[in-house]
């Protein structure tokens, strides 16, 4: 019986999301056909470009790195009951603070400059995550609204800085005015893992942090309390857990992870701060985390899959010639399907729990009735024995 339950749980956790993605691809095939493209050729080209070539595989890993870091932050926040939609803005602020640090301390050796840059990026995102966290915990302000609005604030801040104080002096000298920062020194750049490819050592950092977040959430008292707050807020309060502290902490850590993702994009890929450095990873990371069942280790393959999907979709437009909007349609279908699958999984699991509870109640009632009959029989037997017992 226990084996059957575990198999059912595994199916809900992984089978339903995979089926949802397949369904999204089937629906997307209909749109591709309507656009005049052969769905089989389109999908074969998309996944072959992402996974079947050296360039595609390395670019998939490049995209999977920020997705994984953002997804880890989403796991922390969602497990604590906080709906963090602000990873995009947190990633931008982290990229700004990390780039600023790398430019200000460019004379330091790499062994000091890179960790300091990482720390600056993490702190920048953490501070930006602290804002909605403290508003939620102390003023009960809806974190969905605050994080969404803070995304726009971060975007406008990036526009302002890249067209003002942080613009590359060379752009000002040439009069081109392209919105980008000065290039980073070599000491601030991450090493490339493969020659003539953009995949960098930030991938190792992301995987290591996935293990760290797993240990934090499932092997420490702090993680247990955070998950308890997310599971049952009232029970956590009754149990003496300082829930406000852990709500803020979850958003600080989630923002820090997103900020680190932005910094790694700068020091590992672009080597300078650019417009659009977040590239939508802040939103795609949410889906990757949900697809990984909000588990840090499950987010690793989920990030790889969505990295392949993002890169393959970009190549699809060039190789098959479908309109650019069709690429976003396919991505949107996958997002909607994965999010819906998570909701359906919860509904199926709740229905199964309710059915099991009903069955146990019925069995308990039957046992109670049997116990009462046996008690009555025993009482009758005792009364009969007392009647037959001779009086003294």
Image (cartoon, rainbow, N blue to C red):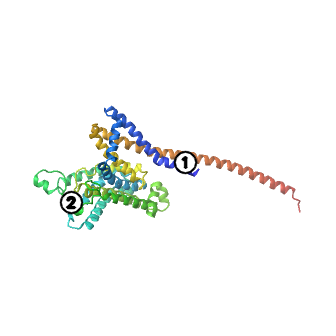
Q: Closer to the camera, 262 or 50?
A: 50
Q: Which mark is residue 184?
A: 2
Looking at the image, residue 127 lies above or below residue 12 = below
Q: Which mark is residue 173?
A: none
Which badge, 1 or 2, comes first in the chain's sequence?
Answer: 2
What whole-number distance in Å separates the C-alpha atoms at marks 1 and 2? Answer: 55 Å
Looking at the image, residue 288 lies above or below residue 210 = above
Where the C terminus falls, by quadrant?
bottom right
Q: Is residue 354 left or right of residue 103?
A: right
Residue 253, image x, y percentages: 36, 59
Q: Is residue 283 left or right of residue 243?
A: left
Q: Are marks 1 and 2 in contact (CB under 8 Å)?
A: no
Q: For the residue carrying disc 1, how many other residues have a C-alpha within 10 Å: few (<14), some (14-19), or many (20+)?
A: few
Task: Please name which of the two marks, 1 or 2, marks the residue nearer to the observer.
Answer: 2
Residue 251, image x, y percentages: 36, 57
Residue 369, image x, y percentages: 70, 48
State whether residue 164 appears in this view: yes
Q: Is residue 183 left or right of residue 60?
A: left
Residue 313, image x, y percentages: 31, 43
Q: Secondary structure at mark 1?
A: helix
Q: Closer to the camera, 280 or 351?
A: 280
Q: Secondary structure at mark 2?
A: loop
State whether residue 101 appears in this view: no
Where is mark 1, residue-wise? Answer: 353
**Residue at image point 76% right, 51% down:** 376
Q: For the residue carrying disc 2, how many other residues have a C-alpha within 10 Å: few (<14), some (14-19), or many (20+)?
A: some
């Amino acid at each position: 019986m226990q084996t059957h339950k575990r198999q059912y749980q595994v199916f809900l956790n992984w089978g339903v999301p995979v089926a949802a993605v397949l369904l999204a691809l089937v629906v997307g095939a209909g749109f591709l056909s309507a656009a005049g493209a052969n769905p089989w050729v389109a999908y074969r080209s998309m996944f072959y470009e992402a996974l079947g070539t050296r360039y595609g595989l390395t670019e998939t890993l490049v995209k999977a790195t920020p997705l994984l870091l953002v997804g880890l932050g989403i796991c922390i926040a969602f497990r604590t009951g906080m709906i963090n939609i602000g990873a995009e803005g947190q990633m931008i602020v982290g990229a700004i603070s990390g780039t600023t640090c790398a430019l200000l301390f460019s004379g330091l050796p790499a062994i000091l400059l890179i960790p300091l840059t990482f720390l600056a990026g993490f702190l920048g995102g953490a501070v930006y995550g602290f804002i909605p966290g403290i508003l939620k915990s102390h003023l009960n302000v809806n974190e969905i609204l605050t994080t969404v609005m803070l995304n726009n604030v971060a975007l406008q801040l990036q526009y302002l800085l890249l067209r003002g104080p942080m613009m590359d002096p060379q752009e000002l000298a040439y009069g081109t005015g392209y919105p980008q920062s000065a290039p980073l020194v070599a000491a601030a750049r991450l090493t490339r893992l493969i020659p003539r490819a953009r995949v960098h050592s930030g991938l190792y950092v992301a995987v290591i942090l996935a293990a760290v977040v797993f240990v934090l959430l499932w092997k420490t008292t702090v993680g247990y309390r955070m998950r308890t707050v997310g599971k049952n807020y009232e029970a956590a309060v009754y149990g003496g857990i300082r829930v406000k502290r852990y709500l803020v902490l979850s958003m600080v850590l989630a923002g820090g992870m997103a900020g680190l993702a932005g910094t790694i994009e700068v020091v590992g890929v672009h080597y300078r701060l650019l417009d659009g450095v977040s590239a939508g990873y802040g939103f795609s990371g949410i889906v990757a985390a949900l697809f990984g069942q909000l588990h840090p280790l499950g987010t690793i393959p989920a990030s790889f899959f969505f990295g392949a999907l993002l890169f393959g979709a970009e190549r699809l437009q060039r190789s098959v010639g479908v309109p650019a909007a069709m690429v976003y349609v396919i991505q949107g279908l996958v997002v909607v399907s994965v999010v819906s699958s998570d909701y359906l999984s919860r509904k199926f699991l709740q229905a199964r729990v309710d059915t099991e509870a009903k069955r146990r109640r019925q069995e308990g009632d039957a046992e109670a009735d049997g116990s009462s009959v046996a008690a009555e029989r025993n009482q009758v037997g005792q009364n009969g024995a007392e009647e037959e017992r001779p009086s003294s």
